[in-house]
Image: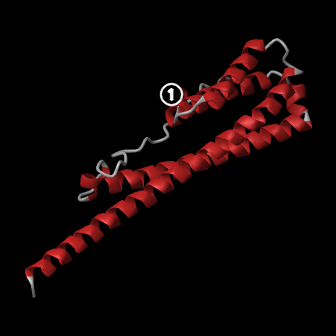
Amino acid sequence: MKPWIWILLVVAVVGFFIVGIYNNLVGIDQAVKQSWAQVENQLQRRYDLIPNLVESVKGYAKHEKELFENVTKARSAWAGASSQSDKVSAANQMEGALARLMVVVENYPQLQAAANFRALQDELAGTENRIAVERMRYNEAVQYYNTVARKIPTVFFVKMFGFDLEKMFFKAAEQAKEAPKVKF
């Protein structure tokens, strides 16, 4: 066999190998993006529920103006967030505001007894569960991406193809790391 045929064959095999690495990275990167889109979808669901929840509470707790302003600011922060890290920060801010809102609700038994408020509260609890599931799926996709991107030989091609060497995990808010204090 002629030497140029061997050279052409080696170049073709190396080319297919590199294309395979690239296609694998594209697929995994898209899975991470899709997982993040599902997190955003559930966060948006939460933010759509919040005005109804706040309006329900407002009638009973008119003097809690600062709390309502904080919830509104947190919701606005989410709406104005453009980067993924800004959205994570806004989501954490909203979780804190909602926790404070639920503390206020505990002071109004007649509000807790209202059927429409209970329905909204159940809807919000379901949404929080969906958010937790989607965050878990996102973190699993990120873990897989990060593992593949750091393995040899892929690690040599990641930057060359314009991919991130490491994706960001969705981490819990700082206040969530401490157990709440329960008083009787």
Identify the image quadrant of the N terminus: bottom left
Instruction: Please indicate, yes or no, whether residue 60 appears anywhere in the rendered image.
Output: yes
Q: Compared to 119, does 60 lie above or below?
A: above
Q: Quadrant of residue 125?
A: top right
Identify the image quadrant of the C terminus: top right
Q: Residue furthest bottom?
A: 1
Percent from the top left, x then y, of residue 58? 85, 21
Q: Quadrant of residue 46?
A: top right
Q: Quadrant of residue 40?
A: top right
Tell me the residue at 35%/48% (across/down): 162
Q: Compared to 63, does 179 lie above or below?
A: below
Q: Which residue is mark 1?
A: 174
- Indicate the colouring scheme: secondary structure
Tell me the residue at 54%/34% (across/down): 88
Q: Residues within 10 Å of mark 1 (few under 14, many from 20)?
A: few
What amino acid is found at the position of numbered circle 1 in the picture?
Glu
Instruction: Please indicate, yes or no, whether residue 132 appears anywhere in the rendered image.
Output: no
Q: Nearer the viewer, residue 136 or 103?
A: 136
